Amino acid sequence: MYEWTKVTLKNYWVTLKTKDKLKKILLYIALFCSSWMVAQTSPVEAIVDTTNIRIGEQFEYKISVEGTENVIIPKLELKGLEVVDSLRLDTLKNKLIQKYILTGFDSGAFYIPKQQIFIRNQAHFTDSLLINVATVKVDTTQIKMFEIKGIKGEPYQFDDYKNTLYWILGILFVVTTVLYFALKRSDNEEIKTREQLLNPYQEAVRNLKLLEEKLLWQNNKVKQYYSELTDIVRNFIERELNVPALETTTRGLIETLSDFTETKSILTDKETITSLNKLLQQADLVKFAKSKPLAHEIEADRNIAKHIVDNIKPNIEIEESSEVDLVIIVEKPIIKNPSALVKIIALLLAIGISISIAYSISKVTPKLNSLKTPITNVE
């Protein structure tokens, strides 16, 4: 009895050991299979929301890639199907998702071929998918037929008038520019004519007044002030006495005027000649020796210039009526200077001419383009 019990326990122990070994073996096999299955899982996936569509119907094709770094998704290549839109690449939980909107315009069964995706310079392929495109049945016996309608013209848009508008603006700019400079030149000539109508004394007095309004010496432009002041005096003497005062030196001019005074060719005194000599010498010192007279000296020189203009006259009595001068000065601009109404009429006329030319060009250009279009014979 004891021996039998001992043998039974021994056999039971061996059986337990055998079962443990089998469990371990099965566990190893399960672990190996699971690791092999994980290793065989592809990191890329392609799916569609439907595999059956009608002609022209759209569906979504989505490619998912595990990982976001060093991923290259080439351009989608299809046969029989067309890409309607390629949506923006999206990232979701360490996964890249690229969506496409596809459609088909031919009935039949079409494959979306395997797409090659590169992940860290290693190529991976998606599964190919079959898409069935069905036709839409139309029962012509149940649909009411309509008459063929005529061709309907499209509404005019800005592009239809764009070329004409550009021509109008260009021609109008050229005509307006020419007209502006022509009128401006006329105004300048009128101003010069009006200035020439002033007698030497009136011109000198006016220029002295304009010189004071410039405030040159008050702004430290003493040299320019004396240069213009002496030019006004010299120009007055040249026009009033018919001597080349602008080109003559100070000494030569004083000697000439002294001779005129002695011969009584001019109505002035020696004090005026002396004042003129003092003024011209002061101006020469300022212009060439960089002298800087004081404010009261500048005012005194200006008064001397006015005194010279008032007291140097030729010994010939010329009766000039101020009314005649006024009539000449006023009437000349009326004759030469176009009025505002004339300018407006000229501008409107220029606009009309520009529009006419632009319209003619816009009509001729399409005809010329049609003549340039080559005609090919189709056999």
Image (cartoon, rainbow, N blue to C red):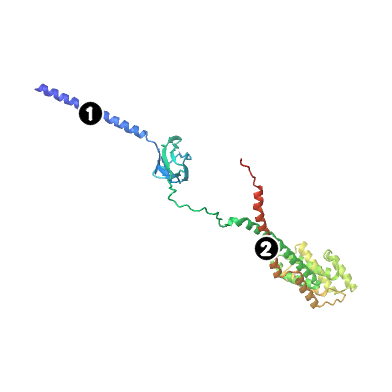
Residue type for callout 2: Gly
Q: Earlier in the sequence, mark 1 or mark 2?
A: 1
Residue type for callout 1: Asp
When the figure is inspected, residue 96 is found, relative to residue 342, above or below; the finding is above
Q: Residue at x 78, y 64 (%)?
A: 285
- For this rendering, which residue is in front, 135 or 334? 135
Is 358 left, or right, of 204 in this rendering?
A: left
Label 1: how many Cα within 10 Å (few below 14, some 14–19, many 20+): few
Q: Residue at x 23, y 28 (%)?
A: 20
- For this rendering, which residue is in front, 174 or 355? 355
Label 2: how many Cα within 10 Å (few below 14, some 14–19, many 20+): some
Q: Which residue is mark 2?
A: 352
Is 52 left, or right, of 198 in this rendering?
A: left
- For this rendering, which residue is in front, 191 or 124? 124
Quadrant where the image shows the N terminus = top left
Q: Position of residue 351 (x, y in %)?
A: 67, 63
Q: Which residue is mark 1?
A: 20
Instruction: Find residue 265 and report its image quarter.
Output: bottom right
Quadrant where the image shows the C terminus = top right
Q: Residue at x 67, y 60 (%)?
A: 356
Q: Which residue occupies the extreme left position in the image? A: 1
Q: Position of residue 286 (x, y in %)?
A: 76, 64
Secondary structure, mark 2, is helix
Q: Position of residue 180 (x, y in %)?
A: 70, 63
Q: Position of residue 241 (x, y in %)?
A: 85, 70
Instruction: Find residue 354 and report its image quarter.
Output: bottom right
